[in-house]
Image (cartoon, helix red, strand yellow):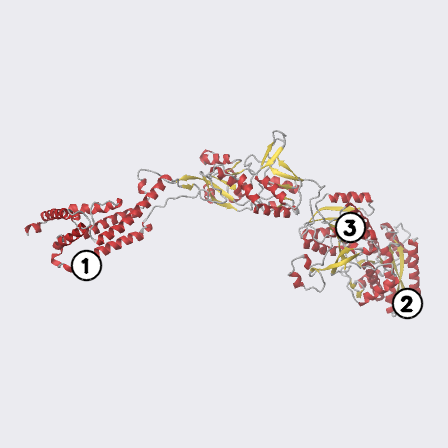
Amino acid sequence: MKRNKSLLVFFISIIILVELSRGQNNRKTEVNVGVVTDVGTVLSDIEMRCINLSLADFYSSRPQFQTRLIPNIADSRNDVVGAAAAALKLIKNKQVMAILGPQTSMQAHFMIDIGQKSQVPIVSYSATSPSLTSLRSPYFFRATYEDSFQVNAISSIIKLFGWREVVIVYVENTFGEGIMPHLTDALQEINVRIPYRSVISLNATYHEISLELSKMMTMPTRVFIVHMSTSLASRIFTKINEIGLMKAGYVWILTNGIADQLSSINETGIEAMQGVLGVKTYVRKFKELEKFRARWRKMFPEMELNAFGLWAYDAVTALAIAIEEAGTNNMTFSNVDLGRNVSELEALGLSQYGPKLIQILSQVQFKGLAGDFRFFKGQLQPSVFEIVNVIGTKERSIGFWTEEIGLVKKLDQEQQSVGALSTWKDHLKHIIWPGEANSVPKGWEIPTNGKRLRIGVPKRTGYTDLVGVRKDPITNSQVVEGFCIAFFKAVTEAMPYDVSYDFFPFEKSDGTPAGDHNDLVYQVYLGKYDAVVGDTTILANRSSYVDFTFPYTKSGVGLIVPVEDQVKRDSISFLKPLTWKLWMTSFFFFFLIGFTVWFVEHRINPDFRGPAKYQASTIFWFAFSTMVFAPRERVLSFGARLLVITWYFIVLVLTQSYTASLASLLTTRQLDPTITSMRSLIEKGEKVGYTRTSFIFGKLTEAGFARSSLIPFDTADDCDELMRKGPENGGVSAAFMELPYMRLFLGQYCKAYQVVEEPFSVDGFGFVFPIGSPLVADVSRAILKVAESTKGRDLEQAFFKNKDETCPDPVTNPDPNPSTKSRQLGVDSFWVLFLIAFAMCVFTLGKFSFFFFKKTQVNNLWQEFNQPDMDSYLNRVEKCSCSSSPHMPNNNTQEVNQANNQSDTSNPTSLSE
């Protein structure tokens, strides 16, 4: 009934238009154009009214035009075949010069072929699928925006909020599938994954819709893009709201196919869409448009004007202008030989008017109600999209997207100010999200009824302190343990939501490892595991097909080599603490000090007098007796005493330093590495070890090691055994390990091995997830929390506890076996002391010589120097007697006499005198 009523309205409108045109001027040329539409639908009613108003407005404002368009309506009956049949009927029976429509992209696909074969232009104002462009027909004009133009606006919204995964929900037809390649490319450019595509049939039942939505409920992704017709969208969102997919935390984004026609959706459907975002075609407001809207509301208060109606209005105007400019000549179809057997499509003939019409139509430009109207490559080009938020019974504008600036609150917002903005609130207005939430949804979460994560763990035979798999003897089930496992459990406990998971060892049926770490990581890419937890190093080649979290261990690959004691202890080890220069310097100063004291004392001190041999021996005896601070001879002069005190201090320093150095030399092991660098190993062709299943094998071959020189090991004991054997006995000269393995190894064998170099830089251990997994960001944040807390330190202390308690931690002490090379004591360590001693000797000798020469004639020097100074001696003895025994002067006198007698006997000159 409604369909018949709509047809009647259209025909009456057309008759009125025709009569008006005839009344104005009977000489006007009538040009038949076809209109293919789904009569009876809301969109069709709006478009047909806009077409009629466009013709009336156009010709009333241009009475001088010689042509008049006569629209001929054909009902496509909401069917693809019906649209094709309607087009054939219009061309065959009415010989239309152009066809407006059809309403959908599926119908347009067939009609474009018909227009191409008959050379009749097809002008559509509502067929938006990008797939129609691929037909490349010069007879197809799209007086609307292609769906692919909006994908950048959608991707900008997703990028602004930082969502990493989206699910696309679209209708299963040409309209729905046409946008997918373009939308997928736009999302890939911003590194957003599409884990699932929900395809729903146009005629899907509520049961089928429920099954599909239930499947999406079990997924972690919470961001959905919906692209379909309004009729299907109304039914789907009603069901979405019923099953709980419109709660807080969900995000729904509508394409302009729905957002442009929200007014046509019933109240129930709109209420189910609360909080959704939409990308809507933006039509700039200006005076003529506002007048038309006011007239529309007055004439058709029960209908709300939309963008498709405005495009229909402008499309008719463009066609009327083109036909007027093309003229009325040659408006015929070529004759077809009906005698031979031809199809109905071939029987249509070719429009002689079509080639000229499409040429002029391509050049038509004017200011239409929907904006600037101009065909570029057969379609209109958009410049702005409006972002809307459904609140209540209508949408609310929250911003705009332009190709030049991107997302902005207002169109007059300057580009420079946008570049300095940092949050989404600076780009869009306030948004009410589903569930009336005010905070931005995270975009994903682990569903309570979803599947548990399948986590692969490496199967190791050694270093089980990191990752170990064993069988529980009671339950006979596999138990996964170790530092990596304990750290992962601490991380999941620190996350803001629960994560359910199960560990699966990467092993064969016989319990042996199923491959190395590269093989295990690749299983995540293949989808066998959802993650990998273990001693998995972050490497560039692995990150090309999986994502890693932040590292949870310190990084580095160390070169470990044996150390040996460099000290050779023998019968002359007591000489090694001092250099030969220091030995010689010390002996020289012993003699110098003894000579200086003798030189000053022998005239006044009988202990330093006597025969020449006796005096010479006294010099050496006195000098070396100072080494133990016990000289027999007494020193009487002030200068000599000051010199001896200075020398006592120097001897004290020398003897103590010698004692300490000799004790260190004889009791301390002085360990030096046998190898100092990786380069020396390569040059000598030495055999080296590496941890089995590690990436280090590849690094070593790239560095230049021959494969035959690389020997794998599983445990710390195996490594120790290989290095103890040495390359001569089937062992290795050195071993390469990552820092965690190195900590465990040196915690047990720090006294025999040393780290000499870190030849390779790596990023440490990380947890593995599929590329684009939203878990990566949350797990990385949780890793930082655990690492900065006491929990992380407790785990390290528990699992990296040294078996040998005397071994330091190589992390806190990077060189656990510091070299203790003995440094021989040299003159450079004591040169200041020797300089002081030398200066004191020079000063003492100089002072004595000055006063001696002052009172002695030159020709009596030797006699006077060798003559004892009895007055000075007696004065000194008398002074000493005041503080000593009263018998001391007599004893000293006797000693002096004895010394003089000896001197006289030994001196010929003295005897003769």
Mark 2 and mark 3 lie on one chain; the one further toward the N terminus is: 2
Q: Residue furthest left?
A: 912
Instruction: Tell me residue 655's x, y (percent).
Output: 30, 45
Secondary structure of the residue carrying tag 1 is: helix
Secondary structure of the residue carrying tag 3 is: helix
**Left or right of 24 on screen, residue 677:** left
Q: Residues within 10 Å of mark 1 (few under 14, many from 20)?
A: few
**Left or right of 124 on screen, residue 93:** right
Question: 292 or 322: nearer the eye?
Answer: 292
How far apart marks 2 and 3 lie (CA) works out to 44 Å
> Which disc is residue 28 wearing?
2
Q: Residues within 10 Å of mark 2 (few under 14, many from 20)?
A: some
Secondary structure of the residue carrying tag 2 is: loop
**Left or right of 724 on screen, residue 202:** right
Amino acid at dot 2? Lys
> Which residue was labeled with disc 1?
850
